[in-house]
Image: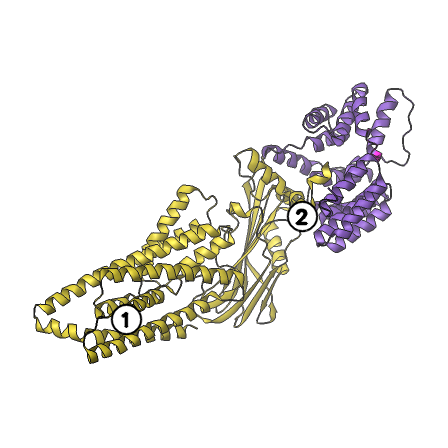
Chain colours: A purple, B yellow
Amino acid sequence: MTELRPGVAAFSRASYAAELRGDTDEARRYLEYAHADAWTPADLAYTRHYLGELALHSGDPATAADRYAEALRAYPAYRPALAGQARAAALSGRLPEALALYETVVERLPLPQYLIEQGETRLKAGLNADWTLLKAQRRLFEAAGVRDDLTWAEFEADHGDPVRAVEHARAEYARNPNLVAADALAWALFKAGKPAEALPYAKKATATGWRNALIAYHRARIERSLGRPTRIDPDFDPALPALARHS
Amino acid sequence: MRRFLLPVAAGLLLASGFLPSAAQALTVPATAAAHPLGTFTVNHYNGLRISPSEVRNLAVVDLAEVPTLQAETQVNGTYAARRCAALAAAQRLVVDGRTVPWRVTESSFAYEPGEGGLRTSRLTCRLAAAVRASETVAFTDGFEQERIGWREITAVGEGVRLSSSVPATSVSRELRAYPEDLLADPLDRRTATLTLSGTGVSPGAARGGVGIGGPVGDALAALDRTFTGLIGSDRLTAPLGLLAVGLAVVLGAGHALIPGHGKTVMAAYLAGRRGRPRDALVVGATVTATHTAGVLVVGLLLSAFTALAGESVLSWLGVAGGVLIAVIGLRLLLTTRRATDHGHGHGHGHAATKRAGLIGLGVAGGIVPSPSALIVLLGAIALGRTWFGVALVTAYGVGMAATLTVTGLLLVKLVDRLEHRAATGRRLAARVSALAPTGTAAMVVLLGAGLVLRSVTTL
């Protein structure tokens, strides 16, 4: 792929594949190739944004914030990078700044994922989370025939009804049995009080070696509840799961 | 694999909320009135009207379900007035190089039922600026432009002539009906530049072409509106397409009845040259070919070069048509005199001259594109339905040709009658017939010169 048609699209995919294998350096290298190849403002913003995401997931929010800012310089209307800045601020503990940024992000593009991140940041800051807009969007998606079981599985497991979370996660996993869906199903089952059923999916989600703090945390919690010896990363903040999740 | 839900540029669109509407199109027929542009969108329309004493704007902001819900907490009795004041402050109007403030004359806000038990909403602001525009008007809409959505501007002159960077009519009917084939690539027009050229009617207002008044004229005008409306209809089905083609033929035929189009010239020519039915057909076919080609060339030029003003192009073509007719008239005069000098020679060269004259007539009759055919083509290009537009313009030309051919055939018949009477020895008729070639040739020259003059005055 990267030899047949080297370019932003091919390098980005190669980078994601490397990230899922747990090879963060390789993932970064491919993204840098993609960045070197990018020419249009949108492509520049896209590659810089994902360099930021990679840094954020490696536990380096400062570098991530720089990359997001560079992405916005290339293309000021690139909303994912604005959301990235909010995420980096929240994960660095700068909650008022993060909330102000989320306000702007949601004002411009109220995607469910941003709304959930905003709600979690508000909860962390000791405020109430208002899920009205999120739930209205769920109604809209359902009325339009759009299925996004993954988002609702994760949201219900973290902030709502674990039984519904399991339903959504099973539906998602049946359609797309990938790492993300496996993790969502594992976490939903754990929250619904079925850690033994959850473990195989948690193992599946981590089987490729993907170094993602959230899925590692999920697996550790599941294993601990089954009485197995395990280590939970003390640097990981379980109060902001949606911020760690997005990739 | 979430990352690749959002690949590069397409991702911007998907992430921006076009995903729900796209997915909807694939899965269920929309029962509730879901916002066609996606439930995240905030859509803007500005309808500018330039009159000799003021500039007005009808600004509409159409909020889809999600932004409506987001704004809900701010809605109270003064909401519309507050929002319109903010809108007026954010819209920049520069008239003849000077920034002019807007005044809000009317504001209203209404909810409409949307999808999933939610509502959409519509803010309508009427703005005015008491300013006498004499050269240029520049407009920029800077009101809440961060959100994704449709952005449309139209402009018309009322009692002033405009050449404009934006169309005169709204393809979305002021954000009420979004043309379906534009949804994947919504309009994004945030600025308008208008150049004024004296008083008169703007191209937008004059889209029906030369009016002929009366009940027939009114009926034609109504047909014309239906026709130009059809091109922008939401769904282009086969029956609707055929209906549009049929209407195009009828309108073309009707259009050819309006004064102009060299009918008088053709009459004079055929009368003077003792035309045969074949000649009428030649003229008709040439008119169709020239008109269709003319509309296509002018339409493509106009859509390719925004600096080109439609009106002046039409005027120049009018001059060209007039000159052509005058030249044909002069040639007629010359050949008539030669014929009288050397007796009646019906040689081969003579037939060729005659054919050239007939074709010239057809070209002159079809060279000025009819404004409504042009608007249909430009509309079709703007809507991404170029081929449909080309088909309609061709049908329009066929209609025109039919009228002209029938007129020509009737004339030929009439001339034959006259000749017949002359041959049977009626003195008056015989004298008229003998004078005909010179007289008609002179008439053709005069008519051509008249056309040139008429077109020059509008330049």
Q: Earlier in the sequence, mark 2 or mark 1?
A: 2
Q: CA distance from mark 2 to mark 1?
A: 65 Å
- Between residues A222 and B199, which one lies in front from this camera angle? A222
Answer whether residue A155 is visible to the viewer in this image.
Answer: yes
Element at badge 2? helix
Q: What predominant SS class does the magenta segment belong to?
A: loop
Does residue A215 appear left or right of residue A107 in this picture? right
> Which three-letter amino acid code belongs to the residue tagged 1?
Gly
Magenta stretch: includes residue B311: no
Q: Nearer the viewer, mark 2 or mark 1?
A: 1
Query: Magenta residues?
Result: A207-213
Q: Quadrant of residue A143?
A: top right
Residue B355 placement (x, y as % from top left): 29, 66
Q: Nearer the viewer, residue B201 or B314?
A: B314
Position of A159 compared to B129: left or right?
right
Element on which disc 1 rests: helix
Question: Mark 2: which amino acid?
Answer: Ala
Q: Is residue B175 above or below residue B163?
A: above
